[in-house]
Image: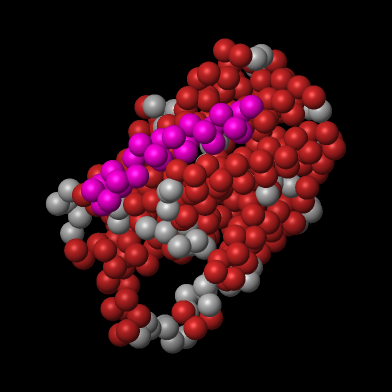
Amino acid sequence: MPVARLSPATLSAVRVTLPGLGVIAVAVALSLAVNRLVPAVSPLTGAVVLGVLVGNLPVLPESARPGLKWATRRFLRAGVVLLGVQLSVAQVLQLGGGMLLVVLVTVLTTFFGTVLLGRLLGLPRGLTLMVSTGFSICGASAVAAVEGIVEREESEVATAVGLVTLFGSVSMLVLPLLADGVELGMWAGASVHEVAQVVAAASPAGAAAVAAAVVVKLSRVVLLAPLAAGLSIAERRRRPAAEGGRPPLIPLFVLGFLAMVVVRSTELFPEAWVPMTKDVTGLLLAGALFGLGSGVRVRSLAKTGPKALVLGLGSTLLVTLVAYTGVRLLG
């Protein structure tokens, strides 16, 4: 039986991408190690911070850049698609109509309120939209999902992820001081940014609170798909066809995300595979965020610093207050 051989062009492409893939592998391993030492720092956060450091110090070989560029977008899209495996329709419906309404109102109020605040502060549109999505949906994963849809600078991606990390960590520490029991779990799930931060915030109240927090948080993640699709449609209207570079009507990765939610909601996807898929999703997104971070230049990042902090603080206060009000009234 003849052995298939790779063409010279394919072999050349592999050689070009391998150094960058090697750098990503090392960076993700370091991010996981930091997460084990400091659980509050998620691998996604560690990866983007490490990427910024590597990108601004003379340590990244030029031979690694083509592989970084190739992998960043592909890992990002694949990670978002696999994120859908963590969700099922049954999990979301278990919350009941009242809590689902709380989640919907919280997400919409936070998103549009943050957009308005960003405009008032005069911040770039791309940064404002990424922060609005990240704070209202699921932190760095949501930022990563929409960064390819909106017009933005590389430095704005790192700023958005940094704000998610900072203010999500503050919420994680403060919320357990203000509530307890299942109420704390629902409040954390509806307001804290990252999934890991949600679990940490609800943990002091026990297993029941953590379970409630995760389900509420995942119901927010479901809204990533329609929000990303809405942003894509808005961007298409802003960019005339003659300019080129218009995003698709509905990005393929959004359709893939929804397809994975449907598959998980049936008996086609073995439940035993869910933890493994979650790990793969985290690795892909960490690799993608390292690649994005490596393209950031700190000088340009510093220009929006103070105003960006005000945006993050305002968005965090908004999502926290709206979620708390909803949990008290309808949860």
* Residue 87 vs residue 250, the one in the foreground: 250
In the rendered view, does 40 fall on the left or right side of 21? right
**Whether residue 59 can be seen here:** yes
Q: Which residues are magenta?
A: 297-321
Q: Is residue 1 magenta?
A: no
For the image shown, how many numbered marks are present on the structure?
Answer: 0
What colour scheme has been applied to the protein in the rendered image? secondary structure
Indicate the position of residue 87 as horizontal and vertical percent values: 69, 46
In the rendered view, does 99 fall on the left or right side of 303? right
Dominant SS type (magenta): helix
What residue is at 46 percent from the left and 55 percent from the top? 126
Indicate the position of residue 241 as horizontal and vertical percent values: 53, 81
What residue is at 47 percent from the left and 28 percent from the top? 169
Query: Is 268 drawn above or below residue 208 in the view shown?
Result: below
Indicate the position of residue 147 as horizontal and vertical percent values: 47, 57
**Whether residue 276 can be seen here:** no
- Image quarter where the C terminus lies is top right
What residue is at 63 percent from the left and 71 percent from the top? 249
> Which residue sits furthest front?
120
> Which residue sits furthest right?
97
